[in-house]
Amino acid sequence: MANSRKSNSDGFPPLNGEDDLQLRIAGALSPVVPAGSSILLGLSGGVDSVVLLHLLHRISSSLSWRLRALHVHHGISPNADAWAEFCACLCARYGVPVQIERVDIAPLRAHGIEAAARKLRHAVFERQQADFIAFAHHQDDQAETLLLQLLRGAGARGAAAMPRIQPRINAPVLLRPLLDVPRSELLEYASRHGLQWVEDESNADDRYPRNFLRQRVLPLLERRFPAYRETLARSARHFAEASELLDQLAQQDGGQLLSAPAGGEEGEPVLEIARLRSLSQPRARNLLRYFLHRRGAPMPQAVQLDEMLRQVYGARADGAVCVEFGGWQLRRYQGGAYAMPAPNEAAPGLKVVWSGETQLEWPALGSTVFFSRAAGEGISLERLSGAPVTLRLRGGGETLRPGRAAATRSLKKLLQQHHIPPWRRERLPLLYCGETLASVVGVAVAADYQAQRDEPGLVVRCGLMDR
């Protein structure tokens, strides 16, 4: 453990006008984070996150916030265990609950150690429950991020770098309270308060692009342009404004992107090919980028984006289109473009038991199946009580009578009539009561299992998982 400092007697000096940084952070966050909010802090053990822990601990009690920390143990460094222990001891001393999450980067090493660690770290934080998630990114990080994005050929969205406050739909708000604070000020604060932290030895390895910029390029830049941090941060804000304007243009061009046709998952954006064709090439590219961003997909390279447009424009109306990019797929079906994570191989014989849960994961589609009760709607709960209820994949040869006055139909024909996209037909969840097919989720309920008027019913739908 490097860069240790002798602590003050209690470690917590009073919050008063003498500590400008504490007052600035409290003043910036208090209008944004309501009293009673829960804040989860990403704690690496480095000086940046240690300073943010100290700051948030000092101000959280006066602002009635509930603070806890999360340390992701990547297991890459031989010192990883010691770092986790340091974070646990530090939080115990502060009286802040801490969670240590171990991840295994081995399956993702092909993407590079940095990318694998970042992907796993993001996945861990996406699983957490909190009102806000706070990260210790600072002004130097922002400058490095902007330069890296520009060197990768990023557009306005990428060059906007990191926002200070990042609201998200059905997910915790991301906070970066230190984004306008240079690292030198954090080091001075840590020294003044006698804080201890750890140093990641990989930070000295300039084979990593960020370290190369930090150690070799930026010191030279600072000699000629001492205020480069502030000016690059200002540029990032300009790019963020430009990105917002481009999003507004895409919203005008795209119309209602959230109207999923029959067979689409609830809330799934579907982009009309006719709208793309009606636009100039730059506006079509902008709309497609916005569509993919809304879907949570990684941003494709320019050549991939052009290939997507070429294929969705040029395919026959019934032509199959599938463009792979970054673990995702862009597909076309009946005049609409769909974006989705590339599905894992569906396990033959997949069966998920329902025991009264309000939702179950359905891995075959990377989706969630939701269950809710309503009188006179959906599946009769009384009929379901006679045997175990399971979700299964198609096996072939299934039939279903979708109404009392309807004829029994093969599942193949039923799915075609409901315009279910071909790639989804083999992966839709089928709800069985015992060995009887009671419902094709989101498509039809078997006549004998339909809830009658005022009868307790179970409404089952397939919706998007948080991604």
Image (cartoon, rainbow, N blue to C red):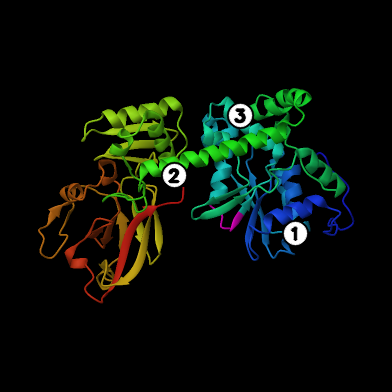
Q: Is residue 21 above or below residue 250?
A: below
Q: Residues within 10 Å of mark 3 (few under 14, many from 20)?
A: some
Q: How many marks?
A: 3
Residue 462 locus on image (x, y percent): 34, 55
Few, some or many residues within 10 Å of mark 1 (<14, 14–19, 20+)? some
Residue 142 in the figure: left or right of residue 115: right
Name the kind of residue labelled 1 in the image.
Ile
Residue sitting at x 58%, y 43%: 121
Identify the residue at image location x=56%, y=40%.
Answer: 241
Q: Amino acid at mark 2?
A: Arg
Residue 67 appears in the rendering: yes
Question: Magenta region: which residues?
Answer: 127-132
Residue under pointer 1: 59
Q: Position of residue 204 (x, y in %)?
A: 73, 29
Q: Tell me if residue 276 comes above or below residue 194 in the rendering.
A: above
What residue would you read off at disc 3?
148
For marks 3 and 2, the one nearer the N-term is: 3
- Say whether residue 437 is left or right of residue 268: left
In three-dimensional space, the C-alpha distance between marks 1 and 2, rounded to whole angstroms, equals 35 Å
Residue 332 lies in what quarter of the image? Answer: top left
- Indicate yes or no whether the magenta region holds residue 318: no
Q: Which residue is mark 2?
A: 294
Asked whether residue 130 is drawn in magenta, I would say: yes
Cα separation, mark 3 vs mark 2, equals 23 Å
What's the residue type where badge 3 is placed?
Leu
**Which labelled disc corresponds to residue 139?**
none
| Among numbered discs 3 and 1, the one appearing first in the sequence | 1
